[in-house]
Image: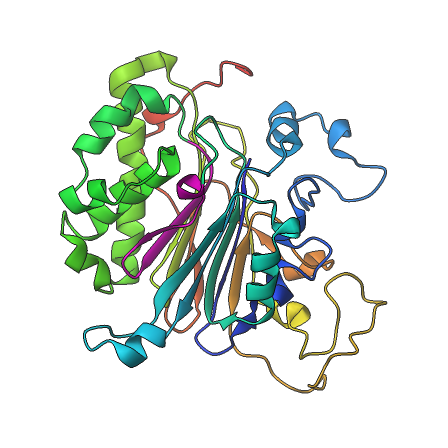
């Protein structure tokens, strides 16, 4: 399975290298190494191969080496272009493994952002190429995914029939994830043109569009496959640079979705300006310019895996729930309501 990392804050920017490269379990190192508290204990005595959960082992045995992408929000266009208001996403994609990507390392060491998405890809069958790397950008909106839409080829044509015309034209690759992004943008803008991608929408409308996207995918699978449909893993995340919606979802009666955690504290541990170290309480951060008394701004991190050593900084998002973050940085976990009849049976683990 892929891995992704999201950071958003109304107050406190992050240095990209602090959150994406420097920690021992940064996303750039999750190509092969994984840390899954509350799903898989961490330590030599609890290795992945020891887990009785075959689905967990399958998801985390893959190498995430099929593409890197980051999107970060900047006010550059707002400062120069008359009709642009508010932050807009800059995008970098590469086919190189992140730890060996010189351009990525240079960019991350010299860029800060109040909102950041990062993704490393393990393909579920589509071509390894830059356009298939996440995140996907639609105007001021960004979307990424960990998991897979099951039986995607069976529903792809009907799925594209639901897209607004401009959303269809913006699908440049062949992944199930980018098609989900186009369906989400169609619902968010009520079938609007690309001009509607530049608008902000209330957080409730972002959540409603996300929920509708999930349900329509399930309904298409029910229509085409009936009882032969397989469960989906849909860990979607979207932002407009100020607000964010992330979901952890699998339409199965008992199986867990892929891992997804959130934290309102880890940003301080990751930020090298502040005392503390992401890898150990025993390590000293010699780069700190702040004191223990200094306050860090409100922020939220949502990630496939924790990127700091301290488990108490992280919460596992509840199965089949969304985490929303509003303009002020307030986090709310909300169950995703759908018809249980749309659940599927896993043919490999009935």
Say which quarter of the image contains residue 75: bottom left
Question: In the rendered view, would you say 18 is above or below 63?
Answer: below
* Residue drawn 41% across the image and 39% down it: 132
Q: Nearer the viewer, residue 132 or 245?
A: 132
Q: Residue at x 29, y 35 (%)?
A: 215
Q: Which residue lies at the image location 28% right of the left edge and 26% below the top edge?
A: 156
Q: Is residue 135 magenta?
A: yes
**Farthest residue in the front direction?**
102
Q: Position of residue 135 (x, y in %)?
A: 42, 49
Side of 25 relative to 7 (left or right) = right
Residue 143 lies, in percent from the top left, at 37, 50
**From this viewpoint, is residue 323 visible?**
yes
Q: Is residue 248 something one can see in this rendering? A: no
- Report whether 192 appears left or right of 286: left
Tell me the magenta residue range.
130-148
**In the shown orientation, is residue 134 left or right of residue 293?**
left
């Amino acid at each position: 399975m892929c891995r992704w990392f999201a950071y958003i804050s109304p107050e406190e920017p992050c240095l990209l290298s602090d959150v994406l490269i420097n920690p021992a379990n940064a996303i750039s190192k999750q190509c092969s190494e994984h840390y899954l508290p509350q799903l898989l204990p961490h330590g030599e005595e609890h290795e992945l191969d020891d887990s009785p959960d075959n689905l967990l082992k399958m998801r985390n045995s893959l190498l995430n080496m099929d593409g890197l992408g980051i999107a970060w929000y900047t006010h550059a266009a707002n400062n120069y272009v008359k009709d642009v208001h508010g932050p807009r996403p800059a995008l970098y994609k590469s086919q190189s493994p992140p730890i060996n990507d010189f351009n990525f390392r240079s960019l991350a060491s010299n860029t800060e952002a109040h909102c950041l998405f990062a993704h490393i890809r393990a393909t579920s069958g589509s071509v390894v190429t830059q356009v298939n790397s996440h995140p996907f950008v639609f105007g001021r909106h960004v979307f990424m995914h960990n998991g897979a839409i099951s039986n995607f080829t069976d529903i792809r044509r009907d799925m594209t029939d639901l897209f607004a015309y401009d959303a269809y034209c913006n699908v440049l690759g062949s992944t199930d994830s980018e098609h989900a992004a186009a369906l989400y943008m169609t619902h968010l803008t009520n079938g609007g043109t690309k001009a509607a991608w530049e608008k902000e929408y209330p957080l409730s409308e972002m959540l409603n569009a996300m929920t509708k996207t999930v349900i329509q995918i399930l309904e298409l699978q029910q229509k085409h496959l009936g009882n032969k449909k397989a469960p989906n893993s849909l860990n979607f995340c979207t932002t407009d640079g100020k607000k964010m919606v992330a979901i952890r979802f699998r339409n199965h009666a008992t199986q867990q979705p892929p891992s997804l955690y959130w934290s309102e504290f880890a940003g301080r541990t990751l930020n090298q300006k502040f005392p503390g170290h992401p890898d150990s309480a025993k390590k000293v951060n010699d780069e700190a310019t702040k004191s223990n008394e200094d306050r860090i701004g409100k922020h939220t991190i949502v990630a496939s895996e924790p990127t700091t050593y301290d488990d108490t900084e992280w919460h596992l998002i509840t199965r089949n729930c969304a985490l929303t973050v509003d303009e002020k940085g307030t986090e709310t976990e909300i169950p995703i309501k759908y018809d249980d009849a749309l659940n599927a049976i896993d043919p490999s683990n009935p």
